């Protein structure tokens, strides 16, 4: 069918009416998958909103603003955005080669005004729009180093062994890139100038072209840091001296400025194992005390060794959560094991199991994706299983990776949005209440959540299998006795009736995942939609009820080629009033009128509604 934008007056009126309904009325309690009426907080779910090989178009900040309503609707509650400041490689810098912490895409430095992701104005608009849609924003903080200095300085230094930074190989004077005076910014926001004594080492001597690790004479590496390479303070570029009082003071001043400027809700902190362990206890403590805000923080201490993570949490007094690198490596190993992994051990020696309140769980990220330094890509077949594990269990704060959700075009990695959305909705609407574990089989493991009365319809049963599939008898609670459950992922087409004792036998296919939830009682409307948009959204209300939040709910691909499908419980209503859009502002105007669907199954094709499944 031909899709139109709201250019006509009648269409504009229609959209305003929809928005008015959305703004002034609570969402109805007739469909638990969209209900926000409960006062119980929705499960938190973070998304890492970038991947390493994003095209250099300067459009990411605008994309954040446009996607925010859809992400909120599917269950994302917070976005971790990439470093927003100017990098030494200008618009080609992913953000980790930090040049100027104060340039958020405002000054013509390193060959451009904008960063890889856009301008300062676009960045602040993205944050404001996301927050207006109920999303929190976490900024990426990179304090370990600076790159792309404005000038060199002569510094007496000691060359050290690359595999043992405590072993000296001789002294020499080097020409080091350590002078950062930011002539273009010219003191705006901060007049601090970085000199050689604000750093403790570099890896390049400009005078001789020698690449080696140089520790500045009479300086010492930070301690305590990771013990890899003897002392892993030095990582890259000009390494900040975190014991220098001027450095400490300037980084606190920047933190105050950044919070006042951006109003972010917290931080993802880079390379913390290369920075003395108690630095962020002071830095975050100062900002939290001065702002009176919680300021959630998660640190990147990338190590598969759970003992190192426990040690950091202890030494930093639990000042931040950590990414659970061990669970990532468990998923990687399982995905490579051709069904021979012992699933009973999937989370042994992980932060998720040992310290769930400090664990940010993940499947992959920008460093583990193909082509990167920590490449350890979890195979695609296993990813729905891994996401089911981190999203429907009670332990940890899960982080969804942009490259999994939207794909990575450079490596022809397709988007998994259609597979991840049902798992996200399961977390958002059903993953509440007491957890019962059945991690007792080498191929099939499962767990249930019994639900809570404050969220009608909540509760679920999850199964994942790396082998031939099968079944598992699990307890979901007597409150669900007699209810009919179905697999929200669509991988299983059968239903399960919960016994009077609260037990039932649930099935899962081979090498697959299934998440069983209550099939809602009352009147249901099933719509098959002939796709005109790549991802159609339906904005609706039961007749007499209230509207969903614009743009509504994403429709999933159906078993009928060319059609999307959705089933909506409308409670006591007898009809569903709806309109369709692409999720980004383009609507099927229908002459400014809405469509009406009766209870049962209907097919929508080019504006015509017929009863039943598409022929």
Image (spheres, rainbow, N blue to C red):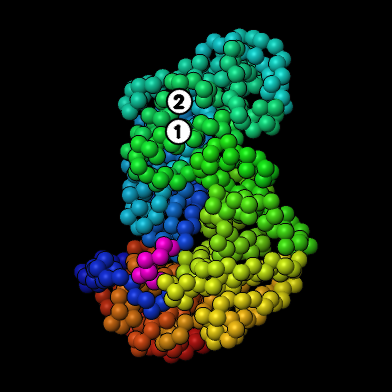
Q: Quadrant of residue 548?
A: bottom left
The foreground one among 177 and 324 is: 324
Q: Are marks 2 and 1 in contact (CB under 8 Å)?
A: yes
Residue at 53%, 42% (x, y): give it: 318
Q: Is residue 40 magenta?
A: yes
Q: Is residue 280 magenta?
A: no
Q: Is residue 209 above or below residue 44?
A: above
Magenta range is: 34-42
Residue on which the image places disc 2: 248
Q: Quadrant of residue 40?
A: bottom left
Q: Is residue 233 above or below residue 584?
A: above
Residue 603: percent from left, percent from top: 44, 84
Residue at 37%, 66% (x, y): give it: 39
Residue at 69%, 21% (x, y): give it: 166
- Indicate the secondary structure of the residue bearing disc 2: helix
Residue at 42%, 81% (x, y): give it: 569
The foreground one among 79 and 115 is: 79
Residue 170: percent from left, percent from top: 70, 11
From the viewer's perspective, is 182 left or right of 163?
left
Answer whether residue 122 is visible to the viewer in this image: no
Residue 368: percent from left, percent from top: 63, 47
Please tell me the numbered disc located at residue 283: 1
Q: Is residue 484 above or below residue 174?
A: below
Answer whether residue 448 is visible to the viewer in this image: yes
The alpha-carbon separation of the residues under discs 2 and 1 comes to 8 Å
Q: Residue furthest right?
A: 340
From the viewer's perspective, is 542 left or right of 138?
left
């Amino acid at each position: 069918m031909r899709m139109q934008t709201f250019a006509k007056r009648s269409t504009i009126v229609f959209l305003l009416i929809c928005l008015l309904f959305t703004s002034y009325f609570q969402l109805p309690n007739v469909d638990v998958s969209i209900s926000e009426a409960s006062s119980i907080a929705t499960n938190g779910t973070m998304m890492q909103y970038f991947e390493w090989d994003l095209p250099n178009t300067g459009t990411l900040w605008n994309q954040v603003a446009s996607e925010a309503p859809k992400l909120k609707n599917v269950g994302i509650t917070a976005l971790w955005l990439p470093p927003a400041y100017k990098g030494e490689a200008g618009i080609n810098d992913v953000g980790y080669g930090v040049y100027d912490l104060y340039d958020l895409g405002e000054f013509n430095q390193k060959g451009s005004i904008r960063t890889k992701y856009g301008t300062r104005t676009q960045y602040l608009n993205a944050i404001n729009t996301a927050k207006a849609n109920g999303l929190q924003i976490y900024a990426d903080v990179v304090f370990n180093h600076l790159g792309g200095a404005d000038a060199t300085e002569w510094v007496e230094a000691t060359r050290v062994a690359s595999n043992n930074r405590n072993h000296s190989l001789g002294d020499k004077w080097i020409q080091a890139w350590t002078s950062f005076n930011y002539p273009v910014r010219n003191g705006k926001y901060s007049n601090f100038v970085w000199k050689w004594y604000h750093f403790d080492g570099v890896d390049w001597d400009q005078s001789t072209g020698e690449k080696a690790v140089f520790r500045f004479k009479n300086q010492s590496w930070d301690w305590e840091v990771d013990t890899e390479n003897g002392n892993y303070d030095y990582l890259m570029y000009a390494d900040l001296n975190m014991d220098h009082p001027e450095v400490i003071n300037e980084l606190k001043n920047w933190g105050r400025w950044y919070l006042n400027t951006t109003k972010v809700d917290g931080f993802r902190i880079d390379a913390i194992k290369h920075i003395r362990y108690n630095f962020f206890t002071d830095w975050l403590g100062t900002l939290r005390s001065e702002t009176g805000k919680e300021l959630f923080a998660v640190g990147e201490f990338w190590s598969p060794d759970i003992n190192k993570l426990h040690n950091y949490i202890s030494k930093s007094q639990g000042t931040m959560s950590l990414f659970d690198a061990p669970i990532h490596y468990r998923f990687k190993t399982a995905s490579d094991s051709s069904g021979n992994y012992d699933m009973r051990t999937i989370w042994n020696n992980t932060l998720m199991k040992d310290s769930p309140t400090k664990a940010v769980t993940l499947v992959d990220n920008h460093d583990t994706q193909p082509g990167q330094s920590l490449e350890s890509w979890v195979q695609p077949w296993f990813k729905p299983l891994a996401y089911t594990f981190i999203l429907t269990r009670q332990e940890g704060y899960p982080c969804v990776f942009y490259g999994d959700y939207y794909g990575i075009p450079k490596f022809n990695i397709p988007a998994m949005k259609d597979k991840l959305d049902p798992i996200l909705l399961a977390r958002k609407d059903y993953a509440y209440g007491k957890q019962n574990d059945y991690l007792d089989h080498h191929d099939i493991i499962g767990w249930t959540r019994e639900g809570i009365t404050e969220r009608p319809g909540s509760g679920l049963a999850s199964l994942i299998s790396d082998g031939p599939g099968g079944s598992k008898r699990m307890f979901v609670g007597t409150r669900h006795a007699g209810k009919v459950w179905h697999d929200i992922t669509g991988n299983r087409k059968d239903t399960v009736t919960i016994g009077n004792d609260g037990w039932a036998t649930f099935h899962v296919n081979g090498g697959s995942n299934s998440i069983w939830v209550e099939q809602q009682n009352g009147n249901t409307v099933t719509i098959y939609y002939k796709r005109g948009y790549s991802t159609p959204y339906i904005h609706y209300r039961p007749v007499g009820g209230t509207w969903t939040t614009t743009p509504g709910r994403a429709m999933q691909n159906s078993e009928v080629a060319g059609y999307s499908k959705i089933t909506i419980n409308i409670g006591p209503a007898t009809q569903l009033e709806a309109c369709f859009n692409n999720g980004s502002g383009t609507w099927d105007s229908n002459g400014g009128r809405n469509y009406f669907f009766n209870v049962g199954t209907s097919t929508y094709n080019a504006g015509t509604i017929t009863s039943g499944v598409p022929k």
